[in-house]
Image (cartoon, rainbow, N blue to C red):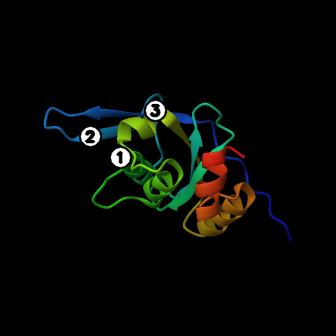
Amino acid sequence: MNIQIPPPGPAIEMVSQKSPKGRIAIKPKSAVLPPGPGVYFIVLKTDPKKVFYIGEARNLAQRIRYTFRCPKSNPSPCSRDYKLAYKTSPTCEDFCRKFSVKYLETRGMLGRLEIEERYQKYHKTNNKKFYTEIIVTGK
């Protein structure tokens, strides 16, 4: 039995702002991110059909903000993949400038991993070969 998975929603631009205390705040430019579970897609701003990274989260809003924050002390898997592809650690400003996010909400925790894996297989993302060969060479 082959179950159809709906496509993710439109790309949402993320912005970074420094607070008066010097902390970096990441938020969507014109939308509200859902606090529930789902799968998220980091896509190129120049071509939202090109997926850079696919992940799953119990809380989409929290995970997406964390991913775009690009912490150096505890980097997300997406930040590590960025370093593989671009040979440098991302800053949140660079990350917000290059990428947008799409997401797909799930009803609950069930099925989230399967949806993530199916999309990763389809887009061939989230593996060393993708980031070292395809992204860098543009193939």
Is label 3 or label 1 in front? 3
Q: Give the percent coordinates (x, y) of residue 85.
A: 53, 51
Q: Residue furthest right?
A: 1
Q: Earlier in the sequence, mark 3 or mark 1?
A: 1
> Circles 2 and 1: CB distance less than 8 Å?
yes
Q: Is residue 88 visible?
A: yes
Q: Which residue is mark 1?
A: 69
Q: Secondary structure at mark 2?
A: strand
Q: Residue at x 65, y 46 (%)?
A: 137
Is label 2 or label 3 in front? 3
Three-letter amino acid code at the position of disc 2: Ile
Q: Give the percent coordinates (x, y) of residue 26.
A: 35, 39
93 relative to 63, above or below:
above
Asked whether 122 or 38 is in front, the reply is 122
Q: Earlier in the sequence, mark 2 or mark 3?
A: 2
27 relative to 60, above or below:
above
Q: Give the percent coordinates (x, y) of residue 97.
A: 46, 32
Which numbered tag is attached to residue 97? 3
Three-letter amino acid code at the position of disc 1: Arg
Q: Residue at x 53, y 38 (%)?
A: 100
Q: Secondary structure at mark 1?
A: helix
109 relative to 122, above or below:
below
Which numbered tag is attached to residue 33? none
Q: Which residue is mark 2?
A: 24
Q: Residue at x 63, y 36 (%)?
A: 10
